[in-house]
Image: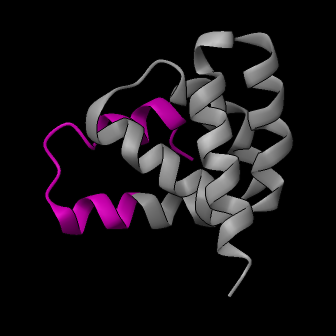
Amino acid sequence: MQSLNDILSELENADNTTKNKIENELVSIGESVLPQLVDQLQVVRGIKRGVVAMTLIRLGDASVKYLEKAAHDNKDFEWVAEYLIREIKGSKVA
């Protein structure tokens, strides 16, 4: 299986179709990739950051504890984590 860095590097020149395919691929990996995704969210920018954030939202509640820990450990990241947690919790109210 490709590493998360390899998968994310495919986003550098990705069109929307490729971007969606990569996001779906990350979601299909499931919860095992959550710690790495939260770590990456704190360092990547641009399209990569958007895809990682959307993947975390789509993985839902399982992402919350990793986001909370990252927010606790990295105060500069706190607002990002809180925003994503609100998105996750809000997406359940349908």
Could you say where residue 75 lies in the image, as x and y percent from the top left?
68, 11
The answer to whether residue 29 is visible is no
Residue 66 percent coordinates (x, y): 80, 36
On the image, which quarter does residue 46 sit in? top left
Identified at 33% across, 27% down, the residue is: 45
Q: Check if residue 91 falls in the magenta segment.
A: no
Q: How is the image coloured?
A: one colour
- Taking the image as shown, residue 69 lies to the left or right of residue 90, namely right
Q: x, y (%) of residue 54?
A: 49, 56
Quarter holding residue 42: top right
Write down the region rendered in magenta.
1-22
Q: x, y percentage for residue 14?
A: 17, 50
Q: What is the residue that sits farthest to the bottom in this orientation?
A: 94
- Is 67 left, or right, of 87 in this rendering? right
Q: Is residue 7 above or below residue 88?
A: above
Instruction: Please say whether residue 4 is one of the residues in the magenta stretch.
Output: yes
Can you say whether 80 is above or below 63 in the image?
above
Q: Is residue 87 left or right of residue 60?
A: left
Query: Vertically, is 8 above or below 77?
Result: below
- To which quarter of the image does residue 37 belong? top right
Give the number of marks.
0
Residue at point 20%, 36% (across, down): 12
In the image: residue 65, left or right of residue 87: right
- What residue is drawn where x is 74% and y is 63%? 89
- The residue under the point 69% across, 11% down is 74
Name the image quarter holding the C terminus. bottom right
Q: Is there any visible trace of residue 60 in the rendered image? A: yes
